[in-house]
Image (cartoon, coloured by chain):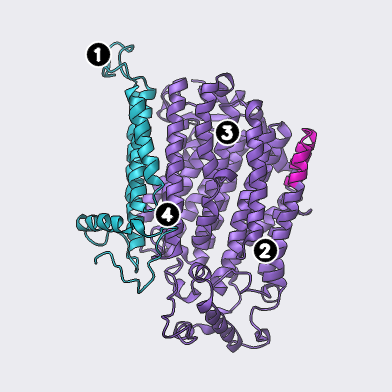
Amino acid sequence: MMTEVLLALPVALPLLAAGPAAALPRYPAARRGLPLAVTAAVLATGLALLAETADGSVHTVRMGDWRAGIAISFAADAFGALLLCTLSFLVLLCLCYAAATGDDREPVFAPLVLVLSAGVYGVLLTADLFNLFVLVEVALAPSYVLLTMGGGGSPRNTAGRIYITVSLLASTLFLCGVALLYGVTGSVQLGALAGAAADSPATAAAGAVVLLALGVKAAVVPVHGWLPRSYPHASPAVTALLSGLLTKAGLFALFRLYAVVYGGDRDYLWLLLAAAWLSMVTGVLGALGEREIRPILVFDMVSQTGFVLLGLALFTADSLTAAVFYLVQYVLVNTALLMCSGAVELTRGTDHLDRIGGLARREPLLTTVFVTAALSLAGLPPLSGFVAKLALLRAAALADHWVTVGVTVTVSLLTLLAMLRIWTAGFAGPPATPEPDDTLGPPGPFRHRHGQEHGRGHGRGHGSGRGGPERDRAPAGGRSARPAVPPPGLGASAHSPAPVLGPGAGMVRSPIRPGLLLPAAVLTVCSLLLGTVAAEPLLDIAETAAGHLVDPARWTEAVTAS
Amino acid sequence: MSTALAAGVLAAGGVFLILRAELLRAILGFMLLGHAVNLVFLASGGLHRRAAPLLDRHDPQAASDPLPQAFVLTAVVITFGITVLLLAVLRASRTPSGPPPGTEGTGGTEGTEGTEGTEDTDAPDAGGRPAAPGHGRGPAG
């Protein structure tokens, strides 16, 4: 009884709270506190579920106590519960981060985040294909608004258009796949579909349409193009939130579907393997080609998705354990990095590697957090990324996939290279202007910023559009609607931005507020813990989770039992 | 057979429209594509059984499958919501200063959008017109 209530809470609580959150825009404390409290409650629920499922048991609930097959059923196993904990923890930190960046001053922010998170939690718990579609839509619809929030005719609108149209196309495809599956099998219950695709090629073809749609959501390579074009243009807090939740929910659904509906059929694994390799290589090469921190990180997400997918493509108990571990730790690390880049962008007005520089000397906390997280992403020893990559390599070696081992090592090295580029240009390098302003007081920063503005007037339209001046953006929280391009008559007059900068000029180059870095620091500490003392327990849970994927019998039994 | 043809024609038209650069056309394309998927859904329940699936009034063998109808209903609602949102994005990207969509009357503006949409088809739309200030083209004319 208790578990049944627990299973409904992660979806019900945020949805119920979204209404009041939308009705309370005038009370900042309530607006900020309500989502935090709800997410903390979901995190507690997730931990309770994880404690219940850590022994490999599966808990289900049928809403309204209808018969199995008719009821909307939710099921929690170790995989779902583990990700529920991870993602709700992430939402909690993203909310703190949004409070620091000021994004949550937008009245729609809190309710949208609540609905978004409810959808994502639902994806982790649902046991029905059509509900999966509905919950994915519940998660996506707020993301459309969040992504375009606070922007006028800026590149953000273009990014929003790409994002919405691609997502909508994928959703239509998803729906079409569900229809085909229903036509072929006569059911959309995952329990009833267990192993169906392994037996009949027609079901496999119908399921492939669903898998393709999920691949778009997860940004797997042949269909990843929307990700680097849309995420870097959202406000930093939104990017951190969306990248932590949405693509991961897609990956989770891919894992669950392939394990249950295809029964891990070996005939199609080569396709997944090819997609995983392509994602790893394409993502990291794209990251190496970018010149701004956030696009680098976003492109690298594609590469990391490939690593996780690799675990599915090998489909052994070891590789799935590694994939679950990888997914959990990489979500944390990636979000930490995106938060750091967002902090740089908000404080400096840009995250272009040519325009920042010398961060290491000025921002010790940022440097520590960023470098730790970046090394974890690349997979260096005392951190969680190392354990994850080692487990993945071991699984690939045990399965005699030596090419995969080679690709994994190469891509890891290239990831390290991408991170080193950020380090050399952004952190270690000299300040971006010739003036030795680091020895001066407030006037120095002002002059520096001045020069930067001047440079930007002539600079590429892309850079100036993406990173609007911080001053404009601060009140609304969102990115400003494209800084005014100076009219030709005035040239790129250095005086035009001066009145804007004047009052708070001293603040422009003030150090990054600790509030902006605290959530990232917490995530980095988690990565450090997961790489050392907490690695063993997490690997144990990941092994239990992988057990349900390798042999979904227990899961399907629990879901179909009446 | 006729359902398959209808779904195919709708999907073809939808894909053709989505591949156009103009967002308004893409939105119309999504509508067509949504209809195509809805037809596929209805067909998946079996089209030869058409009796109302109500209580005991009909033989279950002859009654139509209510599940796909429920699915289609859900899908229609979702598609409608997203379509409206897309129209709002379209409108926001047309307005240089970017006031929140819907602040003006909606009845008259949609007509304007439509005519503007046809004008814009020659413009290379490789990623939206950022509508820079001074471009000289406002939605209200």
Which secondary structure lies at badge 1?
Answer: loop
* Residue bearing the label numbered 1: B57
Question: Mark 2 and mark 3, same subunit?
Answer: yes
Seen from the viewer's position, the closer of residues A310 and A237 is A310
Q: Residue at x 47, y 66 (%)?
A: A102
Measured in 3D between alpha carbons, the distance from the residue under mark 4 to the one under mark 2, in whole angstroms, is 31 Å
Q: Give the label, 4 or 3, closer to the camera.
A: 4
Circles 2, 1 touching at the beta carbon (< 8 Å): no
Residue A84 visible in this rendered orientation of the protein:
no
Q: How far apart are marks 3 and 1 (CA)?
A: 40 Å
> What amino acid type should be assigned to the residue bearing mark 3?
Arg
Q: Which residue is drawn at 45% across and 82% down?
A: A500
User: In terms of image quadrants, where is residue B51?
Assistant: top left
Residue stretch rendered in magenta on the structure: A388-408
> Which chain has been coloured cyan in this picture?
B
Give the secondary structure at mark 3.
Answer: helix
**For the residues marked 4 and 1, what is the alpha-carbon distance in whole angstroms?**
49 Å
Question: Which of the pair A80/A232 is nearer the observer?
Answer: A232
Q: Which residue is disc 4 drawn over? A: A161
Mark 2 is surrounded, within 10 Å at the Cα level, by few (under 14), some (14 to 19) or many (20 or more) other residues, namely many
Chain (purple): A
Residue pictured at 34% horizontal, 56% vertical: B121
Per the rendering, the mark at residue A370 is: 2
User: Secondary structure under badge 4?
Assistant: helix
In this picture, residue B109 sits left or right of residue A108: left
Q: Mark 2 lies on which chain?
A: A
Amino acid at the residue labelled 1: Arg
Q: In which quarter of the image is residue B100?
A: bottom left
- Residue named by callout 3: A256
Mark 3 residue crowding within 10 angstroms, few (<14) / some (14–19) / many (20+): many
